[in-house]
Amino acid sequence: MLTVTNLRKEFRSGAGPVVAVDDVSFEVPDGQFAAIVGKSGSGKTTLLGLLGALDKPTSGTIDVGGQQITKGSDSALIKYRRNRIGFVFQAYNLIPNLSAIENVMLPMEFAGVPKKQRRDRAVELLDQVGITADKHNRKPTKLSGGEQQRVAIARALSNHPKLILADEPTGNLDTQTGKLIVDLLHSLARTKKTTIVAVTHDMEVARQTDLTFRLQDGKLVGQERGGRPVAPVAPGTKVVRV
């Protein structure tokens, strides 16, 4: 379960403080795939960075599987990012001089997993995301965009994360391949009981997720389940449960 409560993030500027995330609260159960949508500047990328412990909030709390991540030390947050979070990016962010299987093994190496276990799990994950054995040793440039994103998803799963955060995961893909990636994320959420949160500008992608949260000027202004609106977010609402 991901629980976000009264989350706020301010940045300093010459004109005074800028509120990028403003008293946002919501929950995403285990095994659910959620989308965060909003116009450019709405705060969705800042919110994703807070969920991934890439930045600290000004106030409020984030709880992932019973672990509160907003008050930990820098070393605790590094451990959290390494062991509890998987990241998937629009540009894939694979290491170009490593093969597909080596890319998937890399986070496990940082976590101290023995080499044979790293390789065995990487093979298992690549198989699960549809990368056939003949492509395991190919470098990213020898894979299609959809295949690179599948490898990136396998890498995100490598350390058994409680939460996967995806930043425009279909942004560089054609419509058909993007749908396949969304279907894959759905399947992984169900089978792995992993919470997945994706930032996207593509409403077609958002409509395929279990939950959709809409941001505007840093505030949570609406929510949908399976593309259908649910109870609106009233002023002063502390936690939104869907």
Image (spheres, rainbow, N blue to C red):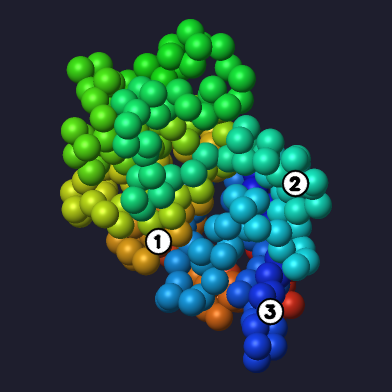
Q: At x 45% / y 50%, what residue is drawn?
A: 166
Q: Nearer the viewer, residue 18 or 141?
A: 141
- x, y percent for residue 88: 43, 45
Residue 121 shows in this picture: yes
Marker disc for residue 200: 1
Looking at the image, tell me whether mark 1 or mark 3 is earlier in sequence order: 3
Left or right: 89 in relation to 178:
right
- x, y percent for residue 97: 32, 32
Number of numbered callouts drawn = 3
Q: Secondary structure beneath disc 3?
A: loop
Marker disc for residue 128: none
Marker disc for residue 74: 2
Q: Quadrant of the C terminus?
A: bottom right
Amino acid of disc 2:
Asp
- x, y percent for residue 116: 48, 8
Q: At x 67% / y 41%, what residue is drawn?
A: 78
Of badges 1 and 2, nearer the viewer stands 2
Marker disc for residue 12: 3
Amino acid of disc 3:
Arg
Q: CA distance from mark 1 to mark 2?
A: 29 Å
Q: Secondary structure beneath disc 1?
A: loop
Amino acid of disc 1:
Thr
- x, y percent for residue 138: 24, 25
Looking at the image, tell me whether mark 1 or mark 2 is earlier in sequence order: 2
When asked about the image quadrant of residue 123, the answer is top left
Q: At x 65% / y 51%, what residue is drawn?
A: 53
Of badges 1 and 3, nearer the viewer stands 3
Asked if residue 230 is positioned above or below residue 161 in the image, the reply reads: below
